[in-house]
Amino acid sequence: MYQLTDKKKRVYNLIDETAKIAQCIKGDYELIFYDTETTGKTKGSFPVQITAIKLRRNNGSAYQVVDRLNLYIKPPISVPEEVVAVHGLSDEFLADKPSEEEVFGQVKSFFGNIEDAENGPIILGYNSKGFDTKKIMDPYFKRCGELNGFVPAREYDVYTMAKELLSFSIMPKGEDGKPHMRLIDCATLYNITGESFHNAETDVEVTIKVCWALYNDYAHTFISYDWLSKPHIDITGSRKFNPNHYIDYTYFNVVIKDNAGNKLASGVVYYDKRNKKFIEDNGDIFGNGNMIQFEKEAMELIKAESKKKGAEKEVAA
């Protein structure tokens, strides 16, 4: 999938997470979308709300909501005022709610056997893998006696999907005048409304709608695009450009040839390792060449280069 950036260069995004989520949606899997509200964003924060929605379908039928979980939890610490200002869950509101130990059985039962890579549920959320799962749910499960914690065998992040498919140049600008890719921004982009953002229940419902919107974009603009009929992109040379920690590029000199070997176009494409994107530096490459084949061969060269550097370091040591 390629897009125009603000600099009028075309960007081809790697779609690893998107492809995996698409496979899950196309299959007859049990999907669980979830979100949490917490006492903070740092390590050691506690859940004050856990919401999850379970979807299921059979033999390619439409997905149906088959179960819901929405629990408010009284944490063992006070909720900071600045956090209450975000989600509205104050100490007063949470005073008569159950403790995390009291509701743990419900939570564990709802999510089921998340460690089963064959038959377990697919866990999804928005920016959930790095925060909700790692910093909130995993410590919560361990505190309640689950030695393995909360470690889903099959978990994907709709936030990563958004980053793979969308460009900041098309995102709505926030109060700071800059574009962002938060859940509310993706919802705005797709005209999806929510009753109260930063409430886990609303956020889960919106995450499902955003996920489906992203999937439809992917299906209509990538899966249905006939890349295989495009001429082959030959890589004629490559070079590294790594001036600092923030810039790590591999430049590829490329030529597009038809089946008879005739040159159709040429140019330069570089791979941005930090953001996992191919960027068209010059020449009309992405619209004319087979990007799937190019991506495969280019990534193989990048991996080979990394192995070579690793071997050189070992010899030097």
Image (cartoon, helix red, strand yellow):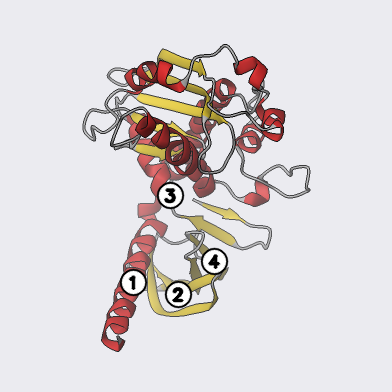
Q: Is residue 191 left or right of residue 127?
A: right
In the image, taking residue 92 as reference, residue 266 lies left or right, namely left
Vertical placement of 73 versus 79: above or below? Answer: above
Of the image marks 4 and 3, the number of the one nearer the N terminus: 3
Going from N to C along the chain, the mark reached first, 3 or 2, is 3
Amino acid type for the residue under numbered disc 1? Leu
Q: Nearer the viewer, mark 2 or mark 1?
A: 1
Between the C-alphas of marks 3 and 1, the distance is 18 Å
Q: In the drawing, what numbered circle is on residue 113?
A: none
The residue tagged 4 is 280
Label pair 2/4, CB-CB below 8 angstroms:
no
The answer to whether residue 94 is above or below residue 39 is above
Q: Is residue 220 something one can see in this rendering?
A: no
Q: Which residue is mark 2?
A: 252
Residue occupied by mark 3: 15
Q: Residue 280 or 56: which is nearer the viewer?
A: 56
Alpha-carbon distance for marks 2 and 4?
A: 10 Å
Could you tell whether 191 is left or right of 150 in the image? right
Which quadrant does the C terminus fall into?
A: bottom left
Q: What whole-number distance in Å separates the C-alpha atoms at marks 4 and 3?
A: 17 Å
Of callouts 2 and 4, the N-terminal one: 2
Which residue is at 50% across, 57% downward? 12
